[in-house]
Amino acid sequence: MNGAESADGDPGSSATFAPLRKPVFRSIWLATQVSSLGWLMQTVAISWLMATVSTSDLMVALVPASSTLPAFVLSVFVGAIADNFNRRKVMFAGRCIMAVASAMLTASVALGFVDPWMILGFSFLIACGGALNDPAWQASVGDIVDRRDVPAAVTLLSVGFNTVRTVGPALGGIVVASFGLVTALAVTTLTYLVPLATIWRCKWKVRSSPLPREPMSTAIYDGLRFTAMSLEIETAIARGTLFGLAGIAILALLPLIVRDQLGGGPLAYGALMAGFGTGAVFAGVSNGVFRRRLSQERLMTLACIACAACSLSLALTSSIAVAAIALALGGAGWVIAWSGVGVSVQLASPRWVVGRTISIYYALIDGGIAAGSWLWGTVAQNHSLAWALEGSAVALLLVAAAGVLFPVRERHESEPDPLEQFNAPAVALNLKPRSGPIVVKVEYLIPAENVDAFLDLMRERRHVHSRVGARQWTLQRNLQRPLEWTETFHTPTWTDYLRLNHRLTTEDRQLGEKVLLLHEGELPPQVTLLIERPTGPARKAEDSTRYVPNR
């Protein structure tokens, strides 16, 4: 599912294959496709292994849940790690976990230690490595390629994964049927070593911040706050979560459909997965054409309808050929839906927070997918496969209708990156990085005829400052001198105040210039910096500040 994102096909965007001119991106991208091929083979092997060792429909449906749940549980933390630490090292650590867990699973199966909960456990551990790697890799794209090539690079991530999807499941089925589960799992482990070696070999420049690393709690808070205050990201996450919840029944129940309804084996399962991947590749390659002709919300609606038609067809057919055609339609809808919501998140996120927004996005949509796997597996076990698939079709149609309330927003340009140019004002106290809380007051003189325009701009200014770190933002008017207005906000520490100003973009600074035009007076608005001091008998040593006279 993480490979289902595609980039905007706007005519102004760079050529789809332009990022491949960058050797580092090309090497890691190719290595990722090898790893994705192994992961798809492993998906077939694990799903079929579970279907043969367990008679519980719920346990079979929990296999995809075990591979998505780590992203839900860990992503908010690994996103902060991706934005605070060396992303190359984070990627390497994630790939190490995947390789080690896969090797342990292979050894366990080879030695005959096979248990349903053990299978889910190793699947979960492999997914933990992926959850650590994916946000760092997605966030690194903007570090490796030029800014104008970022949408094209994201497109290649989608096209690459969905191209591999056309052969991976079928190849997995052939390997399982011809050579056995142990061979399939061993080959997968080897494929995980390819990106591990590539990341070790490749290095790329990352723009460093002059400020110290954020504490994890602050980084997580800022990421959650930015995400919650971005309407585009919020809407994309909501629709993606609902779509994953409703649509995962197609993939989660497919082993049961093959075994119980179609009477097939590993080859049939692999062939049907290949049909799903073929439709996904077609949609990924054609996505630019679709986006030029239709709005993203219209594409999301059509994607939901396509997946609903796929789910309903699977519920009614007993023919492998018909199921393959239905799955091709479902695969096309799957990638079109994820392309819209995924690119909305990518393009609405500046570089300083992109790892966190991507990880929060994955956390919630993968949480929806995990919940959907459990939901439809429970329905299939307690009622029937047909009931579960028909219920999924109805739910997908409701997701399509939800566009009336919160449509997916379109964006044709990336969120501007921060200027990262700010000269700290001189202060008379010897402040430490952790000194605080800091209170910022900006005093304006606004004539009566400018008040309405001033309030409109200040509402926007509140949004801008709050999403980059300002807290307790308020605007006051002097009751005795009505021309005087005071903007006030807090930051936890002096470093957070500096970080806030480093995050402001050119567009944000232009907003400040518009406010300045409404200010009346010979001098610019007066900015006052204060520090809150405890008044209790005990004070921490780290809160102390020393007066340094100006000379």
Image (spheres, grey):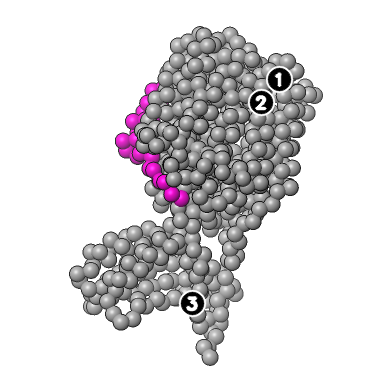
Label 1 and label 3: CA atoms lie apart by 66 Å
**Residue at horizontal 72 percent and vertical 27 percent from the top:** 185
Secondary element type, mark 3: loop
Does the residue at mark 2 contact the one at mark 3 (Cβ under 8 Å)? no
Label 2 and label 3: CA atoms lie apart by 58 Å
Secondary element type, mark 1: helix
Q: Of label 2 and label 3, which has the lower sequence position?
A: 2
Image quadrant of residue 430?
bottom right
Label 1 and label 2: CA atoms lie apart by 8 Å
**Residue at horizontal 59 percent and vertical 66 percent from the top:** 210
Q: Nearer the viewer, residue 150 or 340?
A: 150
Image side of residue 329 versus residue 478, left or right: right
Question: Could you tell me the amino acid type at mark 1?
Answer: Val
Q: Which residue is mark 3?
A: 425
**Vertical relation: 110 (above or below) 470:** above
Does the residue at mark 1 contact the one at mark 2 (Cβ under 8 Å)? yes
Task: Tell me if I can see residue 26 in this picture.
Answer: yes
**Vertical relation: 206 (above or below) 234:** below
Magenta extent: 393-414
Badge number at residue 41: 2
Does the residue at mark 1 contact the one at mark 3 (Cβ under 8 Å)? no
Question: Could you tell me the amino acid type at mark 2?
Answer: Met
Image quadrant of residue 530?
bottom left
**Residue 171 picture location, percent across and down:** 66, 22
**Residue at horizontal 58 percent and vertical 63 percent from the top:** 209
Q: Quadrant of the N terminus?
A: top right
**Residue 167 picture location, percent across and down:** 62, 24
Q: Which residue is mark 1?
A: 175
